[in-house]
């Protein structure tokens, strides 16, 4: 009984399955495919730098509306002929569009308020008036070399530098017409930093040498210091030795002197000799001597 049920189900759902198989897949443009490949798995709304050089041939730039974090975009030799519909990339600072077929329409770049580097070299821009629509941008570098409008004359250079007050380089040359190689500014900055570090090291080494020399120098003691030390020692010796008054005693008054004299002349003293006692002693000694007959 189960087998007929399966057969009925297949018959019922067969038309729906056939309809699903006939639904066309959503087509991905060549531009979108190139962007997807260049992102290398990173979501487009997180990409900060994107390079599509020669990877796609398109007349118009599309598919970048969601690249809200994009800061650098390079589309060299991509067959771009118009800038109409260029996405509003508010974070974009560097745009490379050289070697394409752009004739004008630079007004589409007017919303790139942070753009400082713009390369339009090798395109078909015939008049410098096309730059009027972007002269408010804070450009530091612009490259127009290879366009009909870039005739390398003094008038050309003066006009472009006059349109962009912040401009430092035109066609890789400064205001004086001296060519500046790419990356030279960074190298100069590194050299300056290196020189500063060397100066600091040399200064530290000099300070260390001075400190070492100060440590090696003998300490000189002046004669005045020696004399002061001797005076201090003598004063200390005087303080340690007892004074003459301490040895002799306090001075006596006249009355004290008389009392002392009387005390030493006391007849009852053992040291006092009486003349009468001496005479008696002599008589006694004479009586004891034997008489000779």
Image (spheres, grey):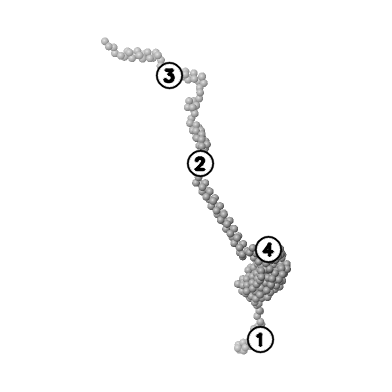
Measured in 3D between alpha carbons, the distance from the residue under mark 2 to the one under mark 1, in whole angstroms, is 114 Å
Say which label, 2 or 4, has the lower sequence index: 4
Can you identify the residue that label 3 sits on?
A: 269
Name the image quarter holding residue 194: bottom right
Measured in 3D between alpha carbons, the distance from the residue under mark 2 to the one under mark 3, in whole angstroms, is 70 Å
Is residue 16 visible to us here? Answer: no
Say which label, 3 or 4, has the lower sequence index: 4
Say which label, 1 or 4, has the lower sequence index: 1
Indicate which label's residue lies in the foreground, 2 or 4: 4
Q: Which mark is residue 15?
A: 1
Can you identify the residue that label 2 sits on?
A: 220
Q: Residue furthest left?
A: 293
Q: Are marks 2 and 4 in contact (CB under 8 Å)?
A: no
Question: In the visual, does 278 lie left or right of 114?
Answer: left
Name the image quarter holding residue 41: bottom right
Instruction: From the top left corner, tell me how far across and down residue 162 is, in percent.
Output: 71, 63
Is the residue marked by circle 1 packed among few (<14), some (14-19), or many (20+) residues within 10 Å?
few
Measured in 3D between alpha carbons, the distance from the residue under mark 1 to the one under mark 3, in whole angstroms, is 166 Å
């Amino acid at each position: 009984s189960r087998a007929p049920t399966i057969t009925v189900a297949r018959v019922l759902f067969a038309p729906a399955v056939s309809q699903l198989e006939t639904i066309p897949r959503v087509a991905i443009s060549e531009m979108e495919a190139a962007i997807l490949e260049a992102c290398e798995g990173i979501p487009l709304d997180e990409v900060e730098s994107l390079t599509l050089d020669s990877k796609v041939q398109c007349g118009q730039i599309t598919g970048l509306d969601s690249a809200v974090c994009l800061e650098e975009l390079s589309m060299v030799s991509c067959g771009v002929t118009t800038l109409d519909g260029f996405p509003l990339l508010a974070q974009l600072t560097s745009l490379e569009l050289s070697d394409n077929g752009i004739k004008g329409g630079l007004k589409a770049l007017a919303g790139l308020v942070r753009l400082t580097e713009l390369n339009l070299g090798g395109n078909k821009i015939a008049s410098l008036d096309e730059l009027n629509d972007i002269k408010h941008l804070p450009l530091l570098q612009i490259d127009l070399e290879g366009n009909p409008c870039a005739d390398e004359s003094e008038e050309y250079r003066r006009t472009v530098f006059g349109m962009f007050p912040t401009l430092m380089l035109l066609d890789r040359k400064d205001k004086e017409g001296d060519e500046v190689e790419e990356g030279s500014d960074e190298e100069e900055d590194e050299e300056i930093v290196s020189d500063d570090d060397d100066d600091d090291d040399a200064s530290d080494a000099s300070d260390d040498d001075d400190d070492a020399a100060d440590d090696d120098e003998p300490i000189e003691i002046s004669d005045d210091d020696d004399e002061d030390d001797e005076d201090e020692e003598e004063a200390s010796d005087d303080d340690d030795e007892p004074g003459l008054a301490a040895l002799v005693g306090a001075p006596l008054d006249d009355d004290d002197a008389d009392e002392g004299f009387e005390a030493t002349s006391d007849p009852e003293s053992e040291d006092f000799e009486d003349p009468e006692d001496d005479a008696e002693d002599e008589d006694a000694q004479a009586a004891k001597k034997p008489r000779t007959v």
